[in-house]
């Protein structure tokens, strides 16, 4: 536990230095969970996330999940999440653009920008295998995730070249995306100890590695029904062109109610 505590302090102490080049955000979530039987349980979760050094609302979401305990060491899950995103869609100049051919812009310069709130629909199916060794619990979760972004029309976009809105409608086509998320986690749980520290690493693959998330946190069982959590996460982005996410540091707080 001491080692994990020092790791958290070390991570937070380097947050401000790293944030000069990476983004920083906050994450807050509320979850209600109901156990239906020894095998089945359902949950409802709401989440808020910020970006741009916590100055911009990034997204709201609400999700419904179902868990089934296949065996003592294996759990199956399925869920749906409705996401309401604050989008910032930026296009860039290409070699064939007139402004590039005329020398007014260079290839790769930002061309136009649209900012709008839109919805996404996300479905997932997971299998989680776990094994305990003493007071430590190791788990591997494999999750298939499909996200669909409906078609959206904006009234106008900001032109970086003209420094004005273009006054033209633009349609962003609907698009679906499949991702395989692989998460390896270790947690420390001891009887009569209300705090459970954990750490995990998660890989996002869509034909290639797109994101990697490193997370360390603590869950505090206030009672049998109430659990508070806090975590620090660093997200490294490689090839996620669809969401245009930067590398990001995230601090999160969660609350879970079981009934």
Image (cartoon, rainbow, N blue to C red):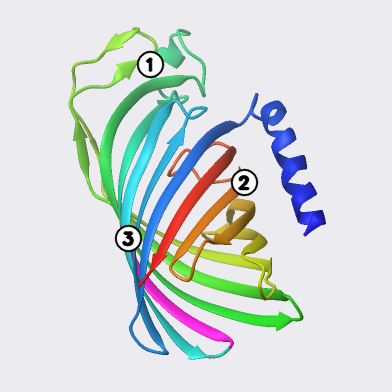
Q: Nearer the viewer, residue 43 or 60?
A: 43
Residue 56 image offset from top left, x and y in percent: 41, 28
The answer to whether residue 46 is magenta is: no
Quadrant in which the N terminus is drawn: bottom right
Q: Main secondary structure of the magenta part?
A: strand
Residue 137 image offset from top left, x and y in percent: 68, 75
Q: Residue 232: which numbered mark, if any?
A: 2
Residue 6 as seen in the image, left or right of residue 93: right
Q: What range of the chain is rendered magenta?
A: 73-81
Q: CA distance from mark 1 to mark 2?
A: 46 Å
Q: Residue 254: which numbered mark, if any?
A: none
Quadrant in which the C terminus is drawn: bottom left
Residue 4 as seen in the image, left or right of residue 174: right
Label 1, secondary structure: give it.
helix
Residue ID at (38%, 16%): 98
Residue 193 as seen in the image, left or right of residue 219: right
The answer to whether residue 76 is magenta is: yes
Of the two numbered discs 1 and 2 in the rendering, the one whose residue sits closer to the viewer: 2
Residue ID at (68%, 74%): 138
Residue ID at (42%, 51%): 29
Q: Residue 63: which numbered mark, if any?
A: 3
Which residue is labeled 1 in the image? 98
- Crowd class of label 2 (few under 14; some 14 to 19; many from 20; radius 10 Å): many
Residue 192 falls in which quadrant of the image?
A: bottom right
Query: Tag 3 or tag 1, which sits nearer the N-term?
Result: 3
Q: Nearer the viewer, residue 252 or 228?
A: 228
Q: CA distance from mark 3 to mark 2?
A: 22 Å
Residue 34 falls in which quadrant of the image?
A: bottom left
Query: Tag 2 or tag 1, which sits nearer the N-term?
Result: 1
Label 2, secondary structure: give it.
strand
């Amino acid at each position: 536990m001491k080692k994990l505590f020092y790791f958290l302090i070390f991570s937070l102490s380097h947050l401000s230095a790293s944030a000069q080049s990476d983004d920083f955000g906050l994450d807050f979530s509320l979850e209600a969970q109901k156990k239906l039987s020894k095998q089945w349980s359902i949950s409802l979760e709401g989440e808020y996330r910020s970006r741009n050094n916590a100055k911009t609302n990034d997204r709201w979401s609400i999700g419904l999940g179902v868990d089934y305990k296949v065996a003592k060491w294996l759990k199956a899950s399925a869920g749906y999440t409705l996401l309401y995103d604050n989008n910032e869609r930026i296009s860039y100049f290409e070699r064939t653009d007139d402004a590039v051919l005329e020398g007014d812009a260079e290839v790769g310069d930002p061309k136009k920008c649209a900012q709008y709130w839109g919805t996404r629909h996300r479905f997932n199916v997971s299998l989680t295998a776990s094994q305990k060794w003493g007071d430590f619990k190791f788990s591997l979760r494999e999750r298939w995730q499909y996200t669909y972004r409906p078609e959206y029309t904006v009234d106008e976009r900001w032109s970086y070249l003209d420094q004005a809105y273009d006054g033209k409608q633009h349609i962003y086509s609907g698009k679906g995306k499949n991702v395989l998320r692989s998460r390896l986690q270790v947690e420390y749980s001891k009887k009569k100890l209300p705090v459970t520290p954990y750490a995990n690493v998660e890989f996002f693959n869509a034909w290639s590695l797109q994101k990697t998330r490193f997370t360390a946190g603590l869950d505090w069982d206030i009672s049998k029904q109430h659990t508070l959590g806090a975590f620090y996460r660093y997200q490294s982005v490689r090839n996620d062109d669809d969401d245009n996410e930067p590398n990001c540091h995230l601090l999160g707080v969660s609350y879970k109610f079981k009934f």
